[in-house]
Amino acid sequence: MKLLTKPIIKKATEQYSKGADFEQMVVAKFFHPWSNWTWYLMNMDDESGSYCWGIVNGFAVESGSFSMKELESIKIHGIGIERDLHFEPVKASELWEALNNY
């Protein structure tokens, strides 16, 4: 599965200047079907995906940077990271609150 589409790249790169501002939108959700880890993309530096910023729900809910290239390289039992095809963009502050109150 292709993790980044042109519309996702466009939205994420447009928000890059917002950094860690939680008033921006989360534009994509990535997960591994055999794991409880989830990555929510807020912004990225360019189309290469070498530097992304978002919310990560793993051992704890955190905000920070991650590499799309690294996500694409993850394979657990031969299965890679997937993009939630039904995810609707949401304001980062709303997602953060929901994840921390779960």
Image (cartoon, rainbow, N blue to C red):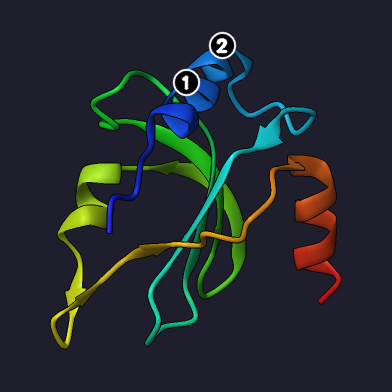
**Relative depth, front residue between 19 and 46:** 46
In the image: residue 30, left or right of residue 48:
right
Residue 10: image tag? 1
Q: Residue at x 47, y 72 (%)?
A: 37
Residue for point 71% across, 26% down? 21
Residue 44 in the image, given as x and y percentages of width and height: 43, 27
Q: Residue at x 81, y 43 (%)?
A: 93
Q: Is residue 22 above or below residue 18?
A: below
Q: Which residue is mark 2?
A: 17
Residue 61: give x, y in percent of width and height: 63, 63
Specify the label residue 95 is tagged with. Answer: none
Query: Element under label 2?
Result: helix
Examine the rendered structure and indicate whether residue 9 appears above or below residue 60. above
Between 77 and 7, the one nearer to me in the picture: 7
For residue 92, side relative to residue 63 (left or right): right
Per the model, the C-alpha gap separating discs 2 and 1 is: 13 Å
- Identity of the amino acid at label 1? Lys
User: Where does the image place residue 31, in percent across and percent down from the top left?
Assistant: 44, 68
Image quadrant containing the C terminus: bottom right
What's the residue at 30%, 43% (across, down)?
67
User: Helix or strand or loop: what does disc 1 sit on?
Assistant: helix
- Whether tag 2 and tag 1 are in contact, CB under 8 A, the answer is no
Instruction: From this view, report whether residue 17 is shown above or below residue 66.
Output: above
